[in-house]
Amino acid sequence: MTTSNPTLAIPGQLLGSTSKYQPGPGTHIHNHNVHASLMGTVHIAQPAKAPGPVKRLTKITPAPAPAVLPTISVTVPTRSAGSDHAGQKKREVLPEVGNVVLCRVIRITPRQAVVAILVCGDTVLEAEWQGLIRVQDVRATEKDRVKIYESFRPGDIVRAEVISLGDQANYYLSTARNELGVILATSEAGNAMHPVSWKEYRDPETGLSELRKVARPY
Amino acid sequence: MTTERPLVLPGDTIPPHLIPSSTTKPLRLGPGLRHLPPSDIIPVVAGQLITNHQKNSMWVEYNNNRYLPTPGDLIIAQIHRSGPDFYYCSLSPYTPHATLPHLSFESATKKTRPQLQPGSIVYARVVLANKHMDPEVECVSQSTGKSDGLGELKGGMVFDVSLQFARRLLMAKSREEGKVEVLEALGAEGLAFEIAVGRNGRVWVGGEDPKAVVVVGRALKETDEGRLGVEEQRKLVRRLVKGMK
């Protein structure tokens, strides 16, 4: 057990106990200990001043609230000093619950659509994360009568919202709002289509329409 | 009314006098034809071009051995295994399995549904088939809730035939249009059997007497492979029945 605070950390390295530190970005908790998740430098942020001593000696006070503990975090240093944006350190953007993301449909099955998340908010992601849109999360109304084949097709670009970080393989996404759904679709003939209503896209060249769950254009 | 049925090859141009023109009904294109906007109709397979002026439709009649599921087709499927909510059954070898929901049988509830073993044969209808997903089949009609002859086929034997022969057997006027008289001839000889024809190139023959089942199966296979005409089919049937006795 290290008694002094380490200045450099590698993933998995023990940093301290949860009774001494609060986990910040770049760390995680395992067995009541704070471990590093990234390889980088360790920073400890001291909290705001602790409240003054309790006036009444007979009052039982709980252990120090979590806000009182210092926050320990691990940050990865920037690659080159030349591309320094006002001293800000570049961090990888990950989709969080509630973010609106753009994704491409990879595969459809009767119960879910598998998508690759490409853009989170305004940032284009460096790696493609896989997501799932379950059949009950496609629409807000009549969830049991949804047909995936009439909502998405492989190759569509979909605007969706992250509802859960999910498991090891997938994020869970939802398109159950008016402004979520397919924003770019290609027809069977290979042409880009224009939206006609909330459930229909039309190919301008052949005149045929195809069913999708269409996102309301801004 | 003379019906010209020319042989077309992929990419041929179709003579305009063959395209049925009707101002009231839209022109319907069946299998084997592709519409390239604005006004080109091109065959994509080799076969006979058939036009129906009453229904204002045209298609190419061709023979192949690879079945492509289409919604509404009646097919014979073999159960491969049972999943949580579905049976996985095969419509044709070396293709992804189709799903058959456990409850899609006549008057089936969770407690009173038929328990099908792997290897059993069902007569089903294709519900969903597209190039992005595995096909789905059902054994009950969605709207009426009745099975209409769909469901498990017990006993008997399944024979493989070419797709075109299966289509000819399923025609309404199979004797005149399809030139298939072998089944009627077998019945006239006194054989007792049941038959179910699947569009995926499989025919199920059932009956009390296994010899009758085998004779029917052989007759179908030899008619299909030998491309026998009506008279030859009758001769074949007489020969087989005589050999059976």
Image (cartoon, helix red, strand yellow):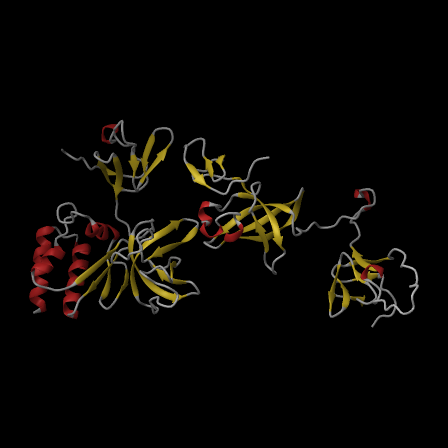
Residue B53 quadrant: top left
Q: Between residues A23 and A48, which one lies in front from this camera angle?
A: A48
Q: Between residues A173 and A60, which one lies in front from this camera angle?
A: A60
Taking A133 as reference, is A32 above or below it?
A: below
Q: Residue at x 45, y 54 (%)?
A: A110
Residue furthest to the bottom: A1
Q: Is residue A57 left or right of residue A23?
A: right
Residue A113 is at least partly visible in this image: no
Residue A35, percent from left and from top: 76, 65
Q: Is residue A72 left or right of residue B83?
A: right
Q: Quadrant of the C terminus of chain B?
A: bottom left
Residue A29, percent from left and from top: 74, 65
Residue A123, percent from left and from top: 68, 43
Taking A94 as reference, is B1 above or below it?
A: above
Q: Residue at x 14, y 65 (%)?
A: B215
Q: Between residues B67 and A181, which one lies in front from this camera angle?
A: A181
Q: How many marks?
A: 0
Q: Quadrant of the N terminus of chain B?
A: top left
Residue B153, percent from left and from top: 26, 64
Q: Between residues A153 and B31, which one lies in front from this camera angle?
A: A153
Residue furthest to the top: B23
Residue B223 quadrant: bottom left
Q: Residue at x 22, y 67 (%)?
A: B156
Residue B220 is at least partly visible in this image: yes
